[in-house]
Amino acid sequence: MSEKKIPAWEVFIQPKTGASFQHAGNVHATDKEMALQNARELYTRRQEGTCIWVVKTENIVSSSPEDQASFFDPADDKVYRYPAFFKVSKKAKGL
């Protein structure tokens, strides 16, 4: 079976429990178990993570650069969504 016919899987690693998953790369595998094993061998050989997600590349949906205005510009008028909008009390230490 050539590599072109073997599905690609995107790999996401959780560096430590409770942390966000980060995209690590991709692997080729015929099924989900093989994809998980390949991801483990390739991306966590030095115990870099606590959990692995594998997702078929074909199942990922993304916006396109042409959609930037409709997806992201409406948030520009909502300054309260930015942390700098809020004032931090002087009593709060370490923030």
Image (cartoon, helix red, strand yellow):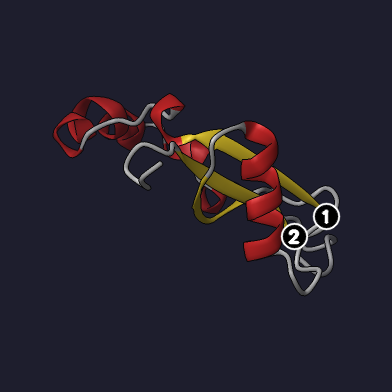
Q: Is 19 or 38 nearer to us in this picture?
A: 38
Placement of the N terminus among the 4 image quadrants: top left
At horizontal 45% and vertical 25% (from top left) the residue drawn is 59
Placement of the C terminus among the 4 image quadrants: bottom right
- Any mark on residue 30, and which? none
* Label 2 residue SS: loop
Q: Amino acid at mark 2?
A: Pro
Say which residue label 2 marks: 15
Q: Is 36 or 22 nearer to us in this picture?
A: 36
At horizontal 61% and vertical 48% (from top left) the residue drawn is 12
The earlier-in-sequence mark between 1 and 2 is 2
Where residue 28 sits in the image (x, y, percent)?
A: 49, 47
Q: Amino acid at mark 1?
A: Thr
Kindly indicate the quadrant of the structure image that contains residue 73: top left
* Label 1 residue SS: loop
Where residue 4 sits in the image (x, y, percent)?
A: 32, 43
Where residue 75 sits in the image (x, y, percent)?
A: 36, 32
Q: Is 36 or 89 nearer to us in this picture?
A: 36
Say which residue label 1 marks: 50
Kindly indicate the quadrant of the structure image that contains residue 88: bottom right
Q: Is 56 or 90 nearer to us in this picture?
A: 56
For the residues bearing labels 1 and 2, Cβ distance under 8 angstroms:
yes
